[in-house]
Image (cartoon, helix red, strand yellow):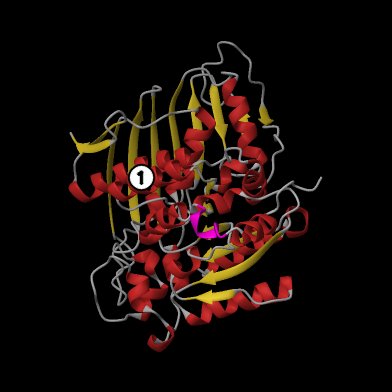
Amino acid sequence: MKHPLSRRTFLKSSIAGGAALAVPAASYARIVGANDRIAIGIIGCGDRGINAHMKGVHAHAAEQKIEITAVSDPWRVRREMASAVANEWYGRPARQFSSYRELVALRDLDAVMIASPDHMHTTHLKAAAEAGKGIYCEKPLAMDFGKLKDACDAVKKANVVVQIGTQLRSLPSFTGCRELYKTGVLGTVSRIEQCRNAERPYWYSYVKDVKKEDVDWKEFLGDRPAQPFDPVKYSGWYGYREFSDGPVPGLGSHFIDLVHYITGATFPTSCVCLGGTFTYKDEHNFTCPDHVQALWIYPEGFMVSYSTNFGNGSGNSFKIFGDEGVLDMVTWTAPVLSAEGGAKRRGQIRGKVPVEDVPRPDHFLDWLQCLRSRKTPNASIDAGYQHAVACLMAVRSFDTGKRTIYDPQKRDIREG
């Protein structure tokens, strides 16, 4: 059925009445009827921006009536590439900007997808929320606790729909694990762990030949100190502490988010974290650790362990241990329940049992549907805040060598 007041009709009538400038920016993002096109802008046109975000929503373009109409990136090459992809899909190129500021200021844009470097996530999230846009934002949500709180508060104040890019929680397999966990079949759960290893750090694969004249270096740096242009820092930013905090927030954010999703856990009460660079010492002088180990204690009564070894790719694991058995999720799409290591007192677990999938929309479709229905997406801003707190606790412990504690009432992380 045709929405009684389409976005175009609203804008036309408002302009005719001389009231267009009086409409709050946040109103525009909410005026999306069932038959209106959703206009989307991309902030960050790297691999995630084009190959994950753009392709992810475009897969639902016909059904959900969406179009990518604007892109922004400090690197001319990537924003031109993204615009050309939009032209191939929709018959017209997306408008190009080097700064996110110009993009979020567009009045005809309903939503944005943020795939910028980690140090800019909260800046872009806050700006998009204040502009009234629907938002899809990559993880990890934040590198700075104060900025995390400011961005999340801006989202709540603007009442915009936000999906965080912890997409694993939308896999049918992990939703199946969530439903299984609720049954209590594992008994008393005491430990949840993931070891996520590789032969070398992932940031090496991103290093490219980038020309200084093609990059708005100041835009990329954001609030980081001024410094000479460095093509390795620009393209391989994942490996530098100025722009990323390494494996725990980079990869472990997915894990810790799944811990919250599957178990229903709230916030960790304490955390310790150690690590360093033990294998990859070379001319790039990357500052993110290639080995790290973090441990969190949760008030729900279990310990959570995350480790990365970027010196050897063996030993990967992802398990929930209960006194009746173990849930093995190392194969993301085929988790298995078994009585291995359990007391077998109740005898509820027989052999190795595949976990049954629970169908649900994929992460991008869920977001697009929520933009229209205004329901809460599967990875809400609250879920993003949760994983960010846990990751920031680990990073602070890594930096200080001390245990960190979180107070949810005061929204405060401290050493103790």
Q: Position of residue 268 (x, y in %)?
A: 35, 32
Q: Quadrant of the N terminus?
A: top right
Camera-side residue: 6 or 127?
Answer: 6
Q: Quadrant of residue 227?
A: bottom left
Q: Is residue 375 left or right of residue 285?
A: right
Q: Which residues are magenta?
A: 18-23
Q: Position of residue 181 (x, y in %)?
A: 57, 25
Going by the picture, which residue comes out furthest to the right? Answer: 1
Answer with left or right where residue 31 lies relative to residue 292: right
Query: Quadrant of residue 36 in the image?
Result: bottom right
Along the viewing direction, whichever of 310 and 7 lies nearer the viewer: 7
Q: Which residue appears at 59% of the width and 30% of the height?
A: 178
Residue 14, placed above or below residue 405: below
Q: Is residue 286 visible?
A: yes
- According to the picture, the residue beneath numbered tag 1 turns out to be 391
Near-viewer residue (386 or 183): 386
Extreme residue in the front direction:
17
Q: Is residue 286 magenta?
A: no
Q: Secondary structure at mark 1?
A: helix
Is the residue 308 above or below the residue 264 in the image? Answer: below
Residue at coordinates 74% horizontally, 48% vertically from top-left?
A: 34
Which quadrant would the C terminus be assigned to in this image? Answer: top left
